[in-house]
Image (cartoon, rainbow, N blue to C red):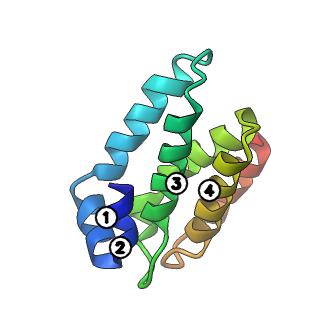
């Protein structure tokens, strides 16, 4: 999904409309939040890169469709030391901030308090 979402905003939007991001978030939660001892860095890198691709592109994605990425990026920032995973999450977070302009400031405040 990350490759397809990164190819064009049209493909990204189709994946988001079919709740592809929700499936990736569910995978992340089951694999890394429910099992903090999981050390599969390759999978975590792929998830952070895929989530970043869901948040990028022009025209910008609707914030309502990508808001779930905030929790994943926040968790990665809090728990991960891998530079590649952190870099993809940072890029994704920057794309999220530049989404369709409907990024609520309370989300950023809540995110910063968690980090």
51 to 44, vertically: above or below = below
Q: Which mark is residue 88?
A: 4
User: Mark 4: which secondary structure?
Assistant: helix
Name which residue lies at 54% across and 16% down. 35
Query: Closer to the N terminus: mark 2 or mark 4?
Result: 2
The x and y percentages for residue 104 are 59, 65
Circle 1 sits on which residue? 4
Q: CA distance from mark 3 to mark 2?
A: 13 Å
The answer to the question of whether label 4 and label 3 lie on touching residues, with beta carbons closer than 8 A, is yes
26 or 46, which lies in front?
46
The answer to the question of whether label 1 and label 3 lie on touching residues, with beta carbons closer than 8 A, is no
Q: Which mark is residue 49?
A: 3
30 to 15, vertically: above or below = above
Circle 2 sits on which residue? 7
Q: In terms of image quadrants, where is residue 75?
A: top right
User: Mark 2: which secondary structure?
Assistant: helix
Query: Closer to the N terminus: mark 3 or mark 2?
Result: 2
Query: Dot 2: within a 10 Å radius of its alpha carbon, few (fewer than 14), some, or many (20 or more) residues?
Result: few
Total numbered labels placed on residues in the image = 4
Name which residue lies at 62% across and 56% down. 88
Query: Dot 1: within a 10 Å radius of its alpha carbon, few (fewer than 14), some, or many (20 or more) residues?
Result: some
Query: Dot 4: within a 10 Å radius of its alpha carbon, few (fewer than 14), some, or many (20 or more) residues?
Result: many
The answer to the question of whether label 1 and label 2 lie on touching residues, with beta carbons closer than 8 A, is yes
Q: In terms of image quadrants, where is residue 98?
A: bottom right
Q: CA distance from mark 2 to mark 4?
A: 16 Å
Q: Which mark is residue 97?
A: none
User: Mark 3: which secondary structure?
Assistant: helix
107 to 5, vertically: above or below = above
């Amino acid at each position: 999904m990350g490759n397809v979402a990164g190819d064009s905003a049209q493909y990204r939007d189709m994946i988001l409309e079919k709740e592809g991001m929700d499936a990736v978030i569910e995978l992340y939660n089951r694999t890394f939040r429910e099992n903090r001892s999981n050390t599969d860095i390759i999978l975590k890198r792929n998830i952070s890169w895929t989530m970043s691709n869901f948040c990028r592109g022009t025209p910008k994605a609707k914030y309502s469709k990508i808001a779930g990425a905030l929790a994943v990026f926040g968790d990665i920032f809090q728990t991960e030391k891998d530079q590649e995973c952190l870099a993809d999450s940072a890029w994704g977070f920057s794309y999220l901030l530049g989404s369709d302009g409907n990024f609520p400031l309370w989300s950023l405040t809540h995110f910063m308090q968690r980090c």
